[in-house]
Amino acid sequence: METEARGAEGPGPAGRPRATTELDITAASLELFDRHGYDETTVDDIARAAGISRRTLFRYFPSKHDIVWGDFAAQVARFRAALHASPADEEPMQALRRCVVEFNDYGADAMPELRTRMRLITTVPALQGHAMLRHQEWCDAIADFVAERTGAAPTALLPTVVAQAALGVSTATFRVWIADGGDLLELLDDAFGLLADGFAANVAAG
Amino acid sequence: METEARGAEGPGPAGRPRATTELDITAASLELFDRHGYDETTVDDIARAAGISRRTLFRYFPSKHDIVWGDFAAQVARFRAALHASPADEEPMQALRRCVVEFNDYGADAMPELRTRMRLITTVPALQGHAMLRHQEWCDAIADFVAERTGAAPTALLPTVVAQAALGVSTATFRVWIADGGDLLELLDDAFGLLADGFAANVAAG
DNA sequence: CCATGTTGTGTCACCGAGTGCCACTACTTT
DNA sequence: AAAGTAGTGGCACTCGGTGACACAACATGG
């Protein structure tokens, strides 16, 4: 694939070119998961669909769970950069709110795939569990941002609590979105508004 | 074990008596995990230490992950009852705060085992992931409570967001406690104070 | 054109978690 | 003593994941 795409950029790196890409594998997997279910799809099924061997598949992804996430690390890097680039006079919680909404704005084209991915992650138990691990990097980005803005250590109580709470809010919002539909970005904006203002004002006997 | 313990209560239920208890298995497992590590301890090791067969072990616990948690479902039931019994004139977020602190008050005797358990859950990746699944019941209890108090549906945005945020706050607090020590109940009280008041007031440029 | 280094791929063997099946065991009641 | 019931253990099997090794496909240098 490097071979055909390199064009005028000169020869690619030495060695045998890669036979596929992470994106191809993820696309093939989501197709299978969506049709037959996550647990019912074996790794051999995926490898066969992607046209590679089982062993090679595990060189592209460390586990079956990770296939669903694609290149999440790159997305987190983008999120981290956006947080860091927020203007100094913007309220931290408002900056967080804005960046989270932007982070989840993949455009209308990517929405169907995003829905499939999030439906799997929020409904399949094995993936629900794994989500926590994948989200940790995302959480760390928030904790670092809050630490930077407040002057606290990234591992102190306030930054970690804000980060984990933000994760919880995101998770809940995605779950509501998958179940009831609606506009994802609007829901996220509402939910993070609640978080910034504090729940006490909004959760009252009624 | 039922056999020796039934005493004057008459004969136990028909059939062969159980050879061990969940608590015995959990105790033996924590010992092994603490000494040799979670991943390094195989299910066969645990079964041998508990004096039962591998097959029987999986009749007591659905997975190796669940062994660490013991009878968590019973604890959640207790938590749910405490929330439901909170006085009607108590602010919901304050009731939640109080109940969470009480929920984690197992007394000084149980502290070493709690530390071991929570150290495993917060540091071993496989258990970190599984924790989300186990905590879901705990989250549902909160969502139901908030729904009850606010009149919203348990699956609406506000109750789910509060519940997930509360879970995130607890997770962060436990992580700080395991890493830095201190008084767990005090930390929880502080963290849930932040959550109730809202982060905006506490997270400001400084 | 051939030799060499480099990188990716496939095959094989293996381990650990988890499950279905079935015989057996230890208790109960009649 | 016979029948019923619930728990146990062994066996074989599936599936996810890993290490080792040979092989294939590219680059470069002679």
Image: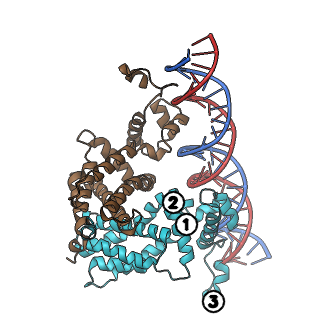
Chain colours: A cyan, B brown, C blue, D red
User: For the residues carrying marks 3 and 1, which lies nearer the camera in this image?
Assistant: 1
Q: Residues within 10 Å of mark 3 (few under 14, many from 20)?
A: few
B135 up-or-down from D13: above or below: below
Whether callout 1 and callout 2 share a subunit is answered yes
Residue A127: give its label.
2
Q: Which residue is mark 1?
A: A68
Whether callout 2 and callout 3 share a subunit is answered yes
Mark 1 vs 2: CB contact within 8 A: yes
Give the CA separation, mark 3 to mark 1: 33 Å
Q: Amino acid at mark 1?
A: Val
Label 1 chain ID: A
Q: Amino acid at mark 3?
A: Ala
**Residue at (36% x, 60% y) in the render:** B143
The picture quadrant where one finds residue A92 is: bottom left
Q: Position of residue A113 (x, y in %)?
A: 56, 74
A70 up-or-down from A43: above or below: below
Label 2 chain ID: A
Q: Is residue B110 left or right of residue B54?
A: left
Q: Which residue is mark 3?
A: A8
Q: Amino acid at mark 2?
A: Leu
D17 or A75, which is in the foreground?
Answer: A75
